[in-house]
């Protein structure tokens, strides 16, 4: 009785694993060329002009990391 459902669970595990592996292979790839990352192109109205959603998302995330206004905080002495 204890081995009765073993094949069912094994089959379910294999199908789930295969689906997980295949889903990682088909991520949305940017379809149009990304503009250069600078202050002018990173404005919201220029980001909105990018038609492909995958390219727009990748470009906007790179713009967030680009930020030229980074200033390190002062060292704290505890």
Image (cartoon, helix red, strand yellow):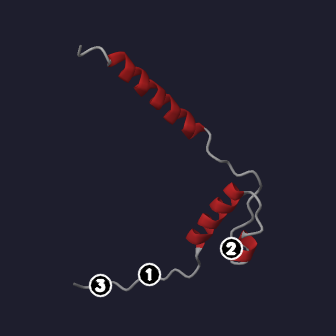
For the residues labelled 1 and 3, say whether their Cβ atoms are less than 8 Å apart: no
In the drawing, what numbered circle is on residue 72?
1
Quarter the N terminus occupies: top left
Q: Residue 35: which quarter of the image?
A: bottom right
Q: Residue 13: which quarter of the image?
A: top left
Residue on which the image places disc 3: 76
Rendered location of residue 56, percent (x, y): 69, 62
Alpha carbon distance from label 1 to label 3? 12 Å
Secondary structure found at label 2: loop
Q: Is residue 44 above or below residue 24?
A: below
Residue on which the image places disc 2: 42
Please tell me which residue is depicted at 62% across the width and 70% down the height of the picture.
Answer: 63
Q: Residue 47: which quarter of the image?
A: bottom right
Secondary structure found at label 1: loop
Secondary structure found at label 3: loop
Q: Earlier in the sequence, mark 2 or mark 3?
A: 2
Please tell me which residue is depicted at 56% across the width and 82% down the height of the picture.
Answer: 69
């Amino acid at each position: 009785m204890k081995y009765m459902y073993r094949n069912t669970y094994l089959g379910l595990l294999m199908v789930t694993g295969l689906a997980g592996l295949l889903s990682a292979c088909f991520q949305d790839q940017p379809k149009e060329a990304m503009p250069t990352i600078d202050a002018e192109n990173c404005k919201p109205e220029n980001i909105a002009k990018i038609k492909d959603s995958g390219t727009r998302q990748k470009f906007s995330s790179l713009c967030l990391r680009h930020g030229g206004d980074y200033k390190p905080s002062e060292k704290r002495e505890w």
